[in-house]
Amino acid sequence: MTKPILKGTLAPAGNVPGLVPPSQPDAEETAWTFRAADYPADERTAAWKQAIDRLRFSLAALDETSPLRGKIQYRASPLGMEFTVVEGASMVFAGQATSRRDAIWLALSLRGEAVLADDEDECDIHPGDLAYGPTGGDATLRFPGRFRALLITAPKVSLNPRILIPLSLNLGHLPGSDGIHSVFSGMLSNLADVLMDVKDHQLRPVELAIPEFLLTSLEAEKIAFGLGGNAGAKAYDFHRVCQDIEANLSDPDLSLKVVAQMSGASMRYIQKLFAGAGTGFSNYIRTRRLERCRQDLGSPIHADLSISEICFRWGFNGTAHFSRTFKAQYGMPPRAYRRSVLPDANGEDGH
């Protein structure tokens, strides 16, 4: 049986007052590990709260009746996703914050039970289950006993636009034992085990896979689109149209007419779908092609491809137009962008 979908969001917090141990990670570090056992028993609680604050999450409750034991591993990815493995006991993450950027969060229970709740409802989270939602509201994620969990925050600017409409609606969870959810859960569980060992370029495929897995899981569960009424139907249609576009981005002849034929909808209806999403059909395709090119330009896997090969690979008709459009979108031409992330890559044909 599908668990109830909760309205609201699990939000990170602002500053937590308290001790700032000298060994706390620097604010600019993209990878760090914190161990409560490294601190004297009477300083662990304050140190732990400070470490949690570095993640911009709030502790609504913490068992202070016994010496605190726990560990935090943090990793920020090249595209801005944040991955954190937390181990501890008897904690409640909660609160509303203004310091957290506009993002989507995921929480995977690796060990131990949890309860996801807001003011209206709650549901149980078992090991392997995924909880999700957008940041910016109130909710609690309660771990009553020993636990290990993977927390992920993904800034909306790094995500495919088609994921934003469904996830702006609900807080909810995906049972990790069912179908495609188990594949998604298994991938993230394996990532948690090697989080501090993988290199930045090895994280890039994971960053790209997470939104696609989430969309597929939501669709399989009929969560994002089984909302009823006109809004649910439009969200479902928008997702389907975007899937067709994504599968055909490399075709330079991809057009509104072609997409309408593929989806079996009228061109006017498709235009309305994109207008409802706050963009236009042509702008969406251009943005998705630019993002694919940007990903290839920054990938060591494609370091031997010239810039012109990459731009033609994703449906652009000319390098000059591509270069102007890329610079307008990202603030620098493709050659400069590639050199900033891959100094030894092929920079030919760039501007």
Image (cartoon, rainbow, N blue to C red):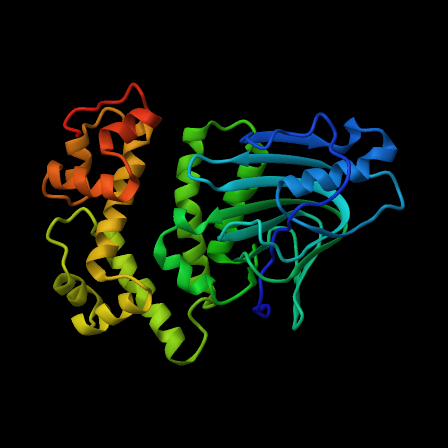
Judged from this view, the residue extending furthest toward the bottom is: 229
Identify the residue shown where x is 77% and y is 27%: 38
Give the image location of residue 41, x and y in percent: 86, 33
Judged from this view, the residue extending furthest toward the top is: 344
Give the image location of residue 311, x and y in percent: 18, 38
Give the image location of residue 307, x and y in percent: 19, 31
Identify the residue shown where x is 39% and y is 43%: 208
Q: Is residue 232 above or below residue 43?
A: below
Q: In this rendering, would 57 be left or right of 252?
A: right
Q: In this view, does 148 lie above or below 269?
A: above
Give the image location of residue 3, x and y in percent: 59, 68
Q: In this rendering, would 173 be left or right of 266?
A: right
Judging depth in this view, the residue of 175 and 268 nearest the camera is 268
Q: In this rendering, would 231 be left or right of 256?
A: right
Identify the residue shown where x is 23% and y is 34%: 333
Q: Quadrant of residue 272?
A: bottom left
Q: In this rendering, would 54 be left or right of 178?
A: right
